[in-house]
Image (cartoon, coloured by chain):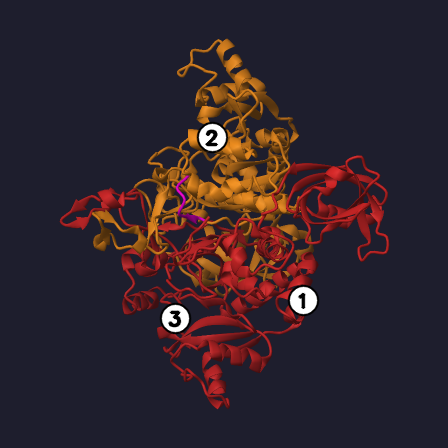
Chain colours: A orange, B red
Amino acid sequence: MLLDLKDVYQKEKDLLGKEIILQGWVRNHRKQKEFGFIDFNDGTSFKNLQVVYDSSLKSFDDIQKIHIGSAITVKGTIVESEGGKQDYELKTIEIKVEGDSPEDYPIQPKRHTREFLREQAYLRPRTNLFNAVFRVRSIAAMAIHEYFQSNNYVYVHTPLITTADCEGSDQMFKITTLDFNKLPYVDGKVDMSKDLFGKTAFVTGTGQLHGEAFAMAYKKIYTFGPTFRTEKSNTKTHANEFWMIEPEIAFCDLDGLMDIEEDMLKFVVNYVLEKCPLEIDFFDQFVEVGLKDKLTKLVNSKFTRITHHEVVDILKKADVKWEFEPSYSDDIAKEHEKYITEYFNGPVFITNWPKDIKAWYMKLNADNETVAAVDLEVPGAGELMGGSQREEDYDKLLKRIDEMHVDKETVDWFCNLRKFGGCYHSGFGMGFERLLIYLTGVDNIRDVIPFPRTPGSCDY
Amino acid sequence: MLLDLKDVYQKEKDLLGKEIILQGWVRNHRKQKEFGFIDFNDGTSFKNLQVVYDSSLKSFDDIQKIHIGSAITVKGTIVESEGGKQDYELKTIEIKVEGDSPEDYPIQPKRHTREFLREQAYLRPRTNLFNAVFRVRSIAAMAIHEYFQSNNYVYVHTPLITTADCEGSDQMFKITTLDFNKLPYVDGKVDMSKDLFGKTAFVTGTGQLHGEAFAMAYKKIYTFGPTFRTEKSNTKTHANEFWMIEPEIAFCDLDGLMDIEEDMLKFVVNYVLEKCPLEIDFFDQFVEVGLKDKLTKLVNSKFTRITHHEVVDILKKADVKWEFEPSYSDDIAKEHEKYITEYFNGPVFITNWPKDIKAWYMKLNADNETVAAVDLEVPGAGELMGGSQREEDYDKLLKRIDEMHVDKETVDWFCNLRKFGGCYHSGFGMGFERLLIYLTGVDNIRDVIPFPRTPGSCDY
C-alpha cells in the first residue's frame, strides 16, 4: 500500500502491523553498529517518520551508506515505538535509493541561517522552517478561496497587462516585445505603436477597477493573483512581485466592509490553526514566541473601530516623544500604528482618512475633507488590509479625477459603471505576504515567497 | 432578512410567506396597467427571480418607471407563483432604486452578438451567457484547488519575473523600469545593468522549473496562475495573457501521470456539473448542443492510451486525404487530432513523442528517439493537457541541454535537482481557458477571459 506520510499520521492506529510503502527523502540518518535510524519525510507532513532497520536485513550494509538528502522508496511495517518519544515508527523491510545525494549536499541537519538558505532558494523548502512556511502559504491560499466561495463570491481573474497608467506609470513595469537595441523611432521618439498591443503596456499593481465591473454583475467578487510594483526599496516588507487578494462588494458600505474583513481574517486564521497545528507550534517555539496565543486571541476578539481623527487625538495625548508628529491631515507612521494596536491590545480598524492622502476613487464623506477609507492595523504586523467605500456618484468621481490629475480617458469605462445601475459598494486589498508574515512570525517578505524578486535580485 | 438570490433558491420552501430583502439588478421589466413584473438578478444565481408588484402599492407609479439595468433593493414576501412557469416569486412590499440606468444602457434584454459584447467587456458579465461563463470559470478554479488540496498537493506561487531566457526570449515579454526615450547606453548597446534587477528581465510562460524544485520537497505540488506569451496570432485559441495549472509530482512515471490527469479532469467536470447545472443546461441549449452528454460521458469513460507511433499507423491507414501527411517524426496536425478522438470516440492520451519536437527536459526513452511525453486530446477541443516524465539523469539532461542550445548557466540550479536527492518525476500543464472552452462550448478564448489581451487589443 503506497501512502503519503500525511495519511499515515491520520490513521496510524489502523495501520499498526500493516505493510506500507512510502517515497520521500532522508532528512537525517543515525547509524549504530546493529541498528540504524532514518528521519524520513515525503513533504506531505511536517512531522518526520522514524524508519528503523537492523542488521538482520541482508541489505544492512548498503542501507547504512545512504546519504542525507537522498530520495528513497521504503517498504516496512508500522510498529509501536519502543520507548522513544514517537508513538509509531516504520520497521524496514526494504529500502531502495531512487536518487543519491552527495556529502556536499548543502542542506545538512544543522542550523542554517535564513540568509544562507535564501541563496539556496531551490533547496530551502526541504528545511523544517521553509517546509512549514510554504505549506502554510498553500493552506492559507485555500482558506481564502473557501471563505469567499462558500459566501457566494465569484473568483475573477482580472488582467495583469494594461495600457492604462492611472496608477502612475512610474510605479508600474513596462512590458514590451520590442528589441531595446533595435527600437523603432518616429519624430525622434520611440514608436510604441509598433509594440504588440499598439501602445505602451504595463503590468498592473491592482485588479480593483476591473473587479468593480464584475461586482456590478455578481454582487460579490474577489481576485487573488500576482501583483507587481517597481519600488526600489530593499526593506523586509517590500518585494517587486507579490500576491494580492482584492474583494469588491456591491450594496456594501464601510461598516459592512469591516464586518467582512474581520470575518474573513478570523476564518483564515482559524483554518490555518486547524490544518497546520504542527507548523504553528514550530513557529511558536522557534520563530515568534507567543504566536499561537496571538492568533487564538485574534479569532476570539472583537476588532476596535475608530476614526483617523480619534487616533490622532489619542496619539497627541500620549506621553511619547514621537519621531513623526501626529497630524489630522497626515498619514500615521509605523510608530503610531504600533502604539495604537498596543493601546487597544488587538486589531484596530482606522476609518475616515484625510482625502488628500488617499486614492481618487474613494467615497468622499459629507465633511468634504475625509474619505470613507479603512485600514486594518494588527499587532506586530502593521497594516494588513486597506479598503474603502467607493465613490458611486458619477459627478463627484469626475471632480476627484480632475483634482487628482488622473487620465480620464483610460478610466472612462470605470466611471460609466456609475451610470449603468451603479450602487454603493466597497472593497479592500490584502497583501498575501503581509498575511503570511502575520501567520508565521517570519518577518522578512523574502522568506515567505518561494522565489522572491527584489531590486537587483532575480536569481533562479 | 437580507439574502443572496442563491440562498433563496436553496431554501425556497422554508421561505414561503417570509419577508426578505434582496439587492441586485433589473434584468427585464414588463409593465401592465394594474401589475408589473421585474426579472430580478443579483448575480449569485443564474436564474432570475420574478418580482411582482401591483397597483395597491402607493409607490406603484414610481416602480413602473424603473429602467432595465437599474440597481434596486427590494423588500417582499416569497409566494407561490400563480400558474406561471416559476414555482416561487417575490411579492413586492417596497422597492428602492439604488442606481438608475438610462434608456441608452447598452445591455438591453435582446440578443446581442458576442462581437458587440466583447466591445462592452465591462458590462457583458451582466448577460446570461457571460454571467454563466464567468461563474463556471470561478467554480472550475475552485474545483482545481479542491482536487489538488484534498490529494495532499501543495499550491506553489512560482515567480513570473525571471532573468533566465531558457524558453527563448523572443517568446517572452521583456519587463523594464527604464524609460524607452532615455535609455542608458554603454559601448553602443542599452545598458541593462541599470534596470531594476540589474539585467534584462522577462515575464515567464511557465512555472515548471520552479515547480520541480518544490516537488522535490513536497512530493506533489501544483501551480495556478497567469502566464504570458508574445505570440502574434489572432486566432480563436490564442491570447497573450491566460491562466495555467502546472502540477509536478515526484516518484511518478508517465503512467502515473496519466492516472492523475484523468482523475483530475473527471473531478473538475463532475464538480462543475454538480455546482452549475443551470449554466450547463443553458450552454447545452444555446451554445453547444450535446454539451451535457459530452461532459457526462467523459466522467464515465476510460481514456484511451496510445503511442504517437500507433497514432501515425492509424492515420496512415485511414481512408482520408490529409492536408498534412502523417509522419512518425512530426507533430500531429489539428485534422489528425480530430480524427483520432473521433476514432476512439473519447479522450485519448498520446504518448512517446519524437524527441526533436518536444522540450529539452523531457525524459529520453530507451529507444533514444522518443521522449516520455504525453498529450491529452479531447473530442471537440483538441489538446487539453501536455506533460511528460522529466529527465532525472543529470548527464543525459546536460546532453539534451547542449543539443537543444539551452543556456546552461540559467538552468544550473534546475539541473542540480538531479544531484541532490533527485528521483523519477513527472508533470503536466493545462491551459485553464482551454478547459473552459471545453466545459462551456464557447469556442473563442476572448469569451472565456474577463478582459482578454490579444495582439493590438488591450482595452479596458
Residue A410 in the figure: left or right of residue A79: left
In this view, the residue farthest toward the front is B33
**Mark 3 vs mark 1: which is more N-terminal?**
1
Query: Crowding at label 3, few (<14), some or many (≥20) Cα neighbours within 10 Å?
Result: some
Per the image, label 1 sits on a secondary structure element best described as helix
Which mark is on residue B358?
3
Q: Is residue B240 visible?
A: yes
Q: Single out the mark in the foreground, 3 or 1.
A: 1
Q: Magenta stretch?
A: A160-166
Amino acid at circle 1: Gln
Residue B2 in the figure: left or right of residue A419: right
Q: Single out the mark in the foreground, 1 or 2.
A: 2
Quadrant the N terminus of chain B occupies = top right
Where does residue A403 sit, x and y in percent of width and height?
Answer: 43, 29
Q: Which chain hosts label 2? A: A
Magenta region includes residue B261 = no
Per the image, label 2 sits on a secondary structure element best described as helix
* B394 w.r.t. B19: above or below: below
Residue B62 in the figure: left or right of residue A355: right
Where does residue A400 sit, x and y in percent of width and height?
Answer: 47, 30
